[in-house]
Structures are given as structure tokens and as C-alpha cells.
Image (tube, rainbow, N blue to C red):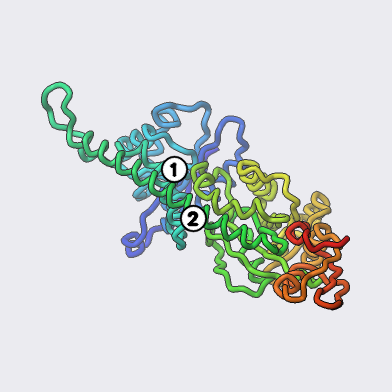
Amino acid sequence: MKEVFTTPHDPENRKKRVAAYIAGIQAPGTAGKDAGYLLDELTRLVDTLGLEIAAREIIPLRQLSAAYLVGSGKAEEIAARARESGADCIVFDEELSPSQQRNWERLSGLGVIDRHEVILQIFADRATTREAIMQVQLAQLEYSLPRLKRAWTHLSRQRGGARGTRGEGEAQIEMDRRMALNRIHKIKIELDKVRNHRDTQRKRRNILPMPAATIIGYTNAGKSSLLNTLTGSRVTQEDKLFATLDPTTRRLLLPCGKALLLTDTVGFIRKLPHDLIEAFKSTLEETRYSDFLIHLIDASSTEVPAHMESTQGVLREIGIENKPTLNVFNKIDLVREKSELDMLRILHPEGVFISARTGEGMEILLKKMDAVVRTRFTVAEFIIPAKRHDLVSAIHRDGVVLEEKYVDSVVQIRAEVPERVRSSLSAFIIS
């Protein structure tokens, strides 16, 4: 199967935007339909990066080639089509080895990048906080280390000399390698400090913690929109892939009167580079400490099963796949056919179906969240010294007070509280 199409170029626009020739790969055993979905996703990624789409095609792959990923004859054909389309670079949906990348650039005379590098650059463009910037820099440095030779091809004519001497390019590569390794070491030290600071903050919260939930899901599923709708906050929300990278936490009052900490996280995607998962593990750690997860899914997507599996894959990689989870299907107002929505309801009877944009289904979602939180509460009776107003206030804030009375110099409180609160106030429990 081969799909090739070109996009008309505005001469003025071409001066402003780099044009990309997008090459999708249909690996052996992969259905053409799946390859098409991945190509569409790569197209969105490239557009998010700000590149113009010159042309694109799906390349059926019978077997892997060490030199070009595809056979040399096919590689020459692709390079010729890319040049004819007016592209400035070729973007592959498969990860290329450093040698394959160099071979393609020599063959085509164009810049060549892969899906991995596109996602890294989008993350670099989106990072705003110091932590996110460092996390992306770490991933970029680790990606670039084996590709330093590619960055110095203009010094390929190394100086001659006696045996054992090194040319200018080789010496510069070694210098760059040492600098990159030193920078990686320093960033890891800084991220450890950030992680320790986050742990300290978490321990302070856990003295008398509120229940916590984390919104997870495929990129552009509407996580920030849901956080804004539920809490009335104004977190950035755009119809773009990876619109936000940094976790945002807001306080939500549930129908039962309990407060809940709700956190929005970075979105996931198929073929998410492993080094990005590693780099963002400190951010994703917040997910580990949640009482439950809200897995947000774009119901209007034709790739719902694949998106759900991608998210579960990342959760497995960071070791939290068994966390209690609510499957929430968003954007039901954008589902074209009622039959498609009906099928999702049949396949996921436990799911909650909403539109964060219109507000449809939000009351049901809040009730579901309320029910999950209530299962994690137990009834306890406390005797608190009257002077410890902070503890009394905390029980009111984080639990539901069923009975309260002042006797002499103590306060007797019967309340439903989270298990963590019960544990932290165990010294004051009488039953």
C-alpha cells in the first residue's frame, strides 16, 4: 500500500516554515489501516512542531535494512520524491539508528529526523517550568550522544598526519561528548534535588492529607479542559498534542462535602520515547501517590483501544497499573455516529461518558468520584485537645463530621475520614 499526496506551497509561507516529507512505515504484520492511523498522528505531530507538510507516503516494509531501514532502491525512490515535493527534510515514523540517519542525509541531501526527535522537540517547545525544561534537556542529550558524529559532518575531511593523530572533527566530537556527559550528570543531580523537594512537600501534605486523584490519558484527550470544568480553574487548554507538560493540582469539593486534590498530567502517545518516560518519572510520581486515577479517553477518536493501551503501557512502565481507575470517555458531543457511542457504552459498561466542553455527564462523573472517595473513608471517633484547633479544622476539611461536641477541655468528634488521616491521628482515636 502506498499513499502519496502533496500540499500546494505558498511561496511567502515557504520562507517562514520548513517543509517536511513524512514517511510512514507499514511493518510486516501491521495492517494498512493501522499504518494509516500512525501516519495521521505523525502528521499532527509535525504540524504541532510548526512544519509545513510537503507530501507524505506509507512505505510497506518486507524486512529491515541495516543501511536505510528500507532497501537501497526504495530509499533512492523516496529521496527523489522528497526532493521533488520541495521538502526541506524527511520525517520517519520509525526510530532511525544514528548510522541510518546519516545514510539518509547523504543519499537525499536533506535533513532527516524520526518520530522520536519530533516528540523531543515538541516537548522542548512546550516546557515552561525549570523542572520540565531540565527533564527535556536530559532526554535530548541522551538522544544526541550517539549522533554527535552527524552534527560534525562538515568536518568530515579530517587533517592528515602521523598515525594516532586525530582530525578536527574527531577531536571536536570527543570534546562535545565530554561536555554532554557532564551536562547529563549535572541535570540528574538537579532533578534529584527537585525530586527530594517534591517528596518533602508530599510528606507535609500527608500529615493530614486530602484524598487525591490524577487525570491521565492520551495526549489531546481533554485533561486540562476537564480540570478546568470541574474546578473552575484556568489551566491552558488547546487543541494541540502535548499542550501542557507540567502537572497542575487544584482542589475540588465533591457533592458529599469532601475535598479532593485533582491533578492534571502530561499526555501519553503511542511510541512515546523511553527516555522521555524516564525523564518525566519524577513528574509522573504524583500519579503513584493518588488514591485513584481518572483515565480520560477521547470518545470521538477512531483509535480508542490503541489510545487506552498506550496509556496502560506507560502506567505499567512506571509500576502503577493496578491503581483504582475510573474510565471516563470525553468529547461525546463530537462522536459522529450514535451507533459508535452505543458500542463504546456496551464495551465499557463501567465507563462514564461526558463532554468537558458542554458539561454533559459531569454530574454523573462527580457522583462516581464521590463514590470512589467514600469507599476509602472509615468512621472514627476522636478526642482532640481543645487547643488543637488545627487538628479539628483538618478533620472538617478532609473528612465528613457526623457528630461534634465540646466536653471540658477536649473536643469529641465522630467523623468519616480517609485512612491516611485516621493513621496520622491514631493517637487521638477512642474507637
Is 54 in front, or is 228? 228
Q: Circle 1 is placed at which residue position?
A: 114
Is 4 in front, or is 354? 354
**In the rendering, at what x and y percent does residue 42 appear?**
51, 49
**In the rendering, at what x and y percent does residue 112 appear?**
37, 43
Q: Residue at x 39, y 45 (%)?
A: 184
Ranked by sequence position, the earlier of labels 2 and 1 is: 1
- Relative to 149, is 236 above or below? below
Asked if residue 105 can be seen in this view, the reply is yes
**In the rendering, at what x and y percent does residue 95 appear?**
47, 38
Q: Which residue is drawn at 30% across and 43% down?
A: 179
Secondary structure type for disc 1? strand
Question: Residue 338 lies in what quarter of the image?
Answer: bottom right
Q: In this view, does 348 lie to the left or right of 89?
A: right
Residue 194: mark in rendering: 2
Question: Residue 166 lies in what quarter of the image?
Answer: top left
Residue mark closest to the camera, 2 vs 1: 2
Amino acid type, label 1: Asp
